[in-house]
Image (cartoon, rainbow, N blue to C red):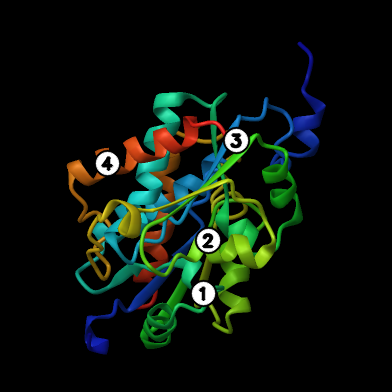
Amino acid sequence: MSTSDIPENALFVCFGGMSNVGTLTGLAALQAVRQARPGQAGIFCLGGLPTEAPLVLSKTRAAHRIITVDGCPLNCARKIVEQAGFAPYRTINLVEQCGIKKGPPQEYGEEEMQVAVKAIVDAITSSE
Amino acid sequence: MTEDKSREEDPTPQEHEDGEKPRVGLFYCGGAMSSVGELTGVAAFEVLKRLGPKEVGMGCVSALAAGVPKHSKTMQSLERVVVVDGCPNSCVRKIVEQTGARMDAYLNLGKDLKIKKIGPFKPLAYSREDLERAVEALLNIAQSNP
């Protein structure tokens, strides 16, 4: 795979399932990538960083920018990215920055979803 | 009207002690660089939908990897912990092993079910049939006794 095939913006999303906001990061990121133009953004494998998966590391190095998307104030995605030695260009937190309330798994509505999608799309397009 | 002070003081609770704990915890990869990673998450949520939150609860693999101690504690308190990876990288299994967390049963969609890894950056390229097979396998593992 040539570096030109690697998305410009590497999204590292929590996609944890213990709360609504964790799950929202994963689902909203899928929608945000669909709204972006081809090659502009892709969701990477967060689990590949602490386990040092070679292809995940090399593709992350080749991406122009890294955007982390966390749901709750634990900011696990940002911590994992930083612990792996990468510096995020943008960090998004759905509770702290988007005002979405943390609650039980799957307890969210379309309004919260669209707020999350917009935050991610804004981060992707702000780099242009 | 009585105000819920505890919620006011802590609008973003980080403990998950206010609800009944599920019997089974599902820890899924959810990585989206390939179809099988995304499929672990989609299949896990389908299992939650079918079995209900009293039987199954979702885990935060990222919290384990980031070293959040209470998540390991929560895992220990469940009756059964099921771990599911999508591809041969087996990242969740490695994270569980590296952190000394618990794993009672393990499923790898590629190795165990021969579901094809499609990528890179094609998270939704799995088929309806692959989803059903992943859900069936997870249901069997989650419901079998330790």
Q: Chain of mark 3?
A: A
- For residue B14, say whether it is visible: no
Assign the N terminus of chain A to one quadrant of the image. bottom left
Question: Which percent across, then down, holds residue A69?
Answer: 50, 61
Residue at numbered disc 1? A49
CA separation in Å, label 3 and label 2: 27 Å
Same chain for the residues under marks 3 and 4 in the image: no
CA separation in Å, label 3 and label 1: 27 Å
Label 2 amino acid?
Arg
Question: Which percent across, then down, holds residue A78?
Answer: 58, 68
Question: Which percent across, then down, holds residue B61?
Answer: 56, 55
Label 4 amino acid?
Arg
- Mark identifier at residue A103: 3
Residue at numbered disc 2? B93
Q: Earlier in the sequence, mark 2 or mark 4?
A: 2
Q: Chain of mark 1?
A: A
Q: Chain of mark 4?
A: B
Q: Looking at the rendering, which quadrant does residue B69 occupy?
A: bottom right
